Image: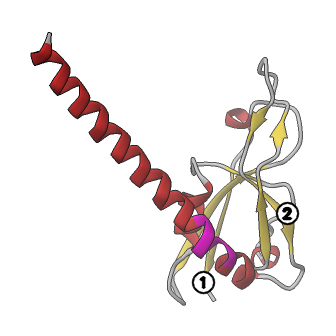
Amino acid sequence: MKKLLIPFITILVLATGYALVLFGHEMCLQVTVRPKIEKELGFTLGTPYVDDGSPRKSEVIAISTVSTNGILHKNGVQPGDIIVREKTIGNFCKRLDQPHGEEVTLYLVSDGDGLPVQQRPVKEIAFVMP
């Protein structure tokens, strides 16, 4: 019994440590990178719930506001657009945290209730970082 307990506890401690590192990295991106890119590109992020026909509403990452003089607005991003192909706000922020002149591509679907997010037409928006 003791021989099984020590490897189990070791694996549990390592898995917990790994999860904490990932969570810490995600939070760091949200705290340090998110405000910078929101200001530079003229938008804010949110996590609304949409009714997409599933038993419960789904939480999504979405563009909350878009500044009319920001680069995202100039490239057709609308308030409420839902971000797809990124699982977390931190990953989305990392995608946008690119050097001046670098091309970035966003994948968005329309906002609101209706079809499941995965079944909505995806619009691909590419632009060069200012």
Q: Is residue 62 above or below residue 11?
A: below
Q: Residues within 10 Å of mark 1 (few under 14, many from 20)?
A: some
Q: Which residue is mark 2?
A: 78
Tell which residue pokes out farthest to the top in this image: 1
Q: Is residue 108 above or below residue 36?
A: above
> Residue placed at 54% from the left, 90% from the top?
100
> Residue placed at 63% from the left, 89% from the top?
130
What amino acid type should be assigned to the residue bearing mark 2? Gln
Disc number for residue 129: 1
Examine the image and state in which quarter residue 78 appears.
bottom right
Q: CA distance from mark 1 to mark 2?
A: 18 Å
> Residue placed at 13% from the left, 15% from the top?
2
> Residue placed at 54% from the left, 67% from the top?
29
Percent from the top left, x then y, of residue 19? 41, 44
Q: Residues within 10 Å of mark 2 (few under 14, many from 20)?
A: many
Examine the image and state in which quarter residue 3 appears.
top left
Query: Could you tell me which secondary element the residue under label 1 belongs to?
Result: loop
Comparing 39 with 21, the one in front is 21
Magenta extent: 30-35
The secondary structure that dominates the magenta segment is helix
Magenta segment: does it hold 33? yes
Comparing 5 with 73, the one in front is 5
Asked whether the residues under the numbered discs 1 and 2 touch, taking CB atoms below 8 Å apart as contact, a structural biologist would say no
Query: Could you tell me which secondary element the residue under label 2 belongs to?
Result: loop
Percent from the top left, x then y, of residue 128? 60, 82
Percent from the top left, x then y, of residue 63? 79, 60
What amino acid type should be assigned to the residue bearing mark 1? Met
Q: Is residue 76 above or below residue 122?
A: below
Magenta segment: does it hold 114? no
